[in-house]
Amino acid sequence: MSVPPVFRDRDGTLIVERHYLGDPGQVSLEREVVAGLSMLRARGHALIVLSNQSGIGRGLLSEADAQRVNARIAELLRENGIDILAWYLCPHAPDVPCDCRKPSPGMALAAARDWNLDLAGSYVIGDKRADLELADAIGGTGILVTTGHGSDAVGWAKANARPVADSLLAAAQFIAARDRPAHSAEDAPAGPKSIVDRRPG
Ligand SMILES: [Zn+2]
């Protein structure tokens, strides 16, 4: 049985949202990110970051700036024993047609190709509706986190039966509960209260 990959947004999900961040000195991890990623890593999920960085296309930061920010995040996570498998970014402004800007699936498809991943059953965690719609596009499950811009999308998420988590740790707990083998379901504790999952079945 293969363990499904977990895709994750960067700004507002992994790190505190700062508009068009190009300065590694301003990186700070969002709440419960280390605990959440540690849990996912222990369960064997491939951890991959997919990030829209339209600030590059808008001329507000360079791709090198964005990579330096990624390197700083990777450093902070590595200090906590967490390795991100890969980072993908869309550098295009919204008015430029491309197949990588979320919710388009280009970055996830590239990751699947690069790392031989099966996207069916995958998860996408993010603070925007585009992250949830990306999950739909690749046959995965989207989980909205209420960090970053997440509170703006809660209404849409609930109206459309998407799970909502109040942190990356809560999202990881949702995945663990969902993926738990059936034979251990009886003695499993109830899912975290912070999760709202209205999906049928
Ligand atoms: Zn793009």
Image: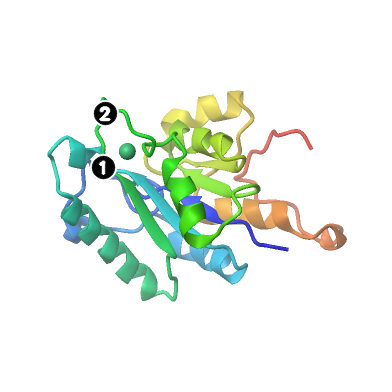
Please give the residue where the numbered disc 2 appears in the rendered image.
Answer: 96
Figure quadrant of residue 2: bottom right
Residue at position x 47%, y 39% from top? 105
Please give the residue where the numbered disc 1 appears in the rendered image.
Answer: 91
Question: Residue 197's x, y, as percent?
Answer: 67, 38
Question: Residue 32's x, y, as percent?
Answer: 46, 59
- Tell me if 186 is positioned left or right of 171 in this view: right
Q: Is residue 66 above or below residue 71?
A: above
Tell me if I can see residue 48 in this picture: yes
* Mark 2 lies within 8 Å of ligand 1 (Cβ measured): yes
Amino acid type, label 2? Val
Helix, strand or loop for disc 1 = loop
- Tell me if 36 is positioned left or right of 14 in this view: right
Q: Is residue 98 above or below residue 106?
A: above
Q: CA distance from mark 1 to mark 2?
A: 10 Å
* Mark 1 lies within 8 Å of ligand 1 (Cβ measured): yes
Tell me if I can see residue 32 in this picture: no
Residue 108: mark in rendering: none
Question: Residue 115's x, y, as percent?
Answer: 50, 61
Quarter of the rendered image showing ligand 1: top left
Which badge, 1 or 2, comes first in the chain's sequence? 1
Closer to the camera, 104 or 163?
104
